[in-house]
Image (cartoon, rainbow, N blue to C red):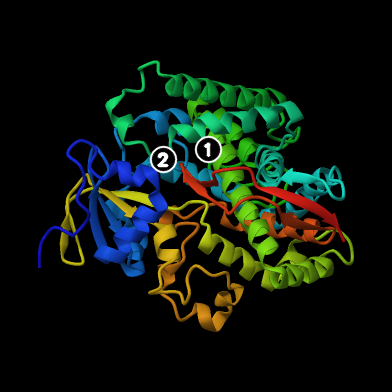
Amino acid sequence: MSVTPPGPIGDPLFGNGRQFADDPFSFMRACADSYGDVVRFDLGPRETYLLTNPDDIERVLVAEAERYRKPNFGDDAMGTLLGEGLLLSEGETWRRQRRLANPSFHSRRIGALAGTMVEHTESQIAEWEDGEIVDVQLEVARLTVRIIVSAMFGADVTDEEVRTVQESLEPLGARFEPDPRRFLIPNWVPTRENREFAAAVDTLESVIDGILDRRRGTERDPGVDPAGPEGVAVSGPPGDPDGDVPMDLLSVLLRARERGEQTDENLRDELVTMLLAGHDTTALALTYTFYLLSKHPTARERVGREAAAATADGPPDAAAAREMTYTDRVLSESMRLYPPVYTLFREPKLDVKIDGYRIPEGSALMCSQWVVHRSPRWYDDPDSFDPDRWTPDRRSERPRFAYFPFGGGPRHCIGKAFSLLEAKIILACVRSRYELEYEGPDLSLRGSLTMHPDHPVPMRIREQ
């Protein structure tokens, strides 16, 4: 067996970068179809290896996670944006930040946030009018920004701040779209893209500063002792919503800063990370779900019946959301077909061997949800929408990492439970009152940090 995996031949300067940039989704699937479990190609400054077998992905993310780290692509734009927040930090920094954040995502606290999710959803959809057309991607992104700021920052966000965040997302996203020429142009070169990216980062930080100004001095109730070294409420279990100490993430981090365990830079990194990651992926999952439901009336009606049941006795809560089992399957199928995070990267700390191939230290390993989720090896008719793939008996037939929209292992998404509850609460509120009919072109996609529609997603609102 060759010690080097097979893969497509690239051009001398950009390798396979042009092919990947033109259509990363088709390129990755074509590589998987043509070359098998491990595929080697060149995306610019380093060798890249695509893993397409769930067992290999589980090994990298879970069983041997300590042998890998997040890669540094020689482009400091990601670091400029997210710093050493949970998505990028490594080692003891990551472990400390994760310990601090855990209480804010405790299951009891997440369940108690359903009321906040309902309040913001009902307020926003009250503006909708029968027959009007809205860009559902923008609508749900506005909504999830408000929810994440309220739930995790303990603050409200103004209409102007929401617009500011939305306007910043375009230049931020454009900076991370695949482009093989980017490695030839340093970040300090004042190109239009670099200038717009830097301005967007500054603008986003100004929104964070405004929230911090409103929160100063409110991280604990008067007369209550500070939380312990991990930000645990003194009067209850981690994340106890009835505890005396506020357990939103910002309060936890502010108390840690008072104890000398956080710098202003640490605080900024975590808040930017939470604001972006905490709203974007849920908004995309809902965008794709509304799109798929509009194309599949039978599934839309079943979700509508569950939504009506969940809201029959008043606003939906966490218990009602748990009963929405078919809606849960619809969300799983939506994130299978359109995973907001469409690929993960890892870098081996030392040379490793995978499927008999040597993978050198410092190379980039690509674990792609897009490829694995749509593979005929694990799914019958993989490009079709079939929520019943997620019945317990059918789900158990597949390898564990044939589906991993939230990653896996020690670095799995800390906000998974929050995101799924939020999505079901929003679907319950919307579908109990409205039907959404898609009126746009066939869906096309573009890759950045996450997978976005490449155009508006117009939906006509129909009152039920």
Element at badge 2?
A: loop
Q: Amino acid at mark 1?
A: Thr
Q: Which residue is mark 2?
A: 88
Q: Residues within 10 Å of mark 2 (few under 14, many from 20)?
A: some
Q: Which quadrant would the C terminus be assigned to in this image?
A: bottom right
Q: Spot the residue most to the bottom.
A: 393
Q: Is residue 256 visible?
A: no
Q: Give the left or right position of residue 26, taking residue 225 as reference.
A: left
Above or below, comparing residue 296 to residue 346 in the picture: below
Give residue 422's position: percent from left, percent from top.
68, 54
Give residue 323's position: percent from left, percent from top.
73, 72
Residue 230: image quadrant is top right
Q: CA distance from mark 2 to mark 1?
A: 9 Å
Q: Are marks 2 and 1 in contact (CB under 8 Å)?
A: yes
Above or below, comparing residue 226 to residue 315 in the picture: above
Query: For this rendering, which residue is in front, 366 or 81?
Result: 366
Task: Identify the residue at image location x=77%, y=48%.
Answer: 116
Element at badge 1?
A: helix
Q: Residues within 10 Å of mark 1 (few under 14, many from 20)?
A: many
Residue 74: image quadrant is top left
Q: Give the left or right position of residue 87, taking residue 274 as reference.
A: left
Above or below, comparing residue 454 to residue 81 in the picture: below
Task: Identify the residue at image location x=85%, y=58%.
Answer: 433
Task: Identify the residue at image location x=24%, y=64%.
Answer: 35
Give residue 191's position: percent from left, percent from top.
40, 18
Q: Which residue is mark 1?
A: 273
Task: Identify the residue at image location x=49%, y=31%.
Answer: 266
Q: How many marks?
A: 2
Give residue 357's position: percent from left, percent from top.
16, 61
Q: Which mark is residue 107?
A: none
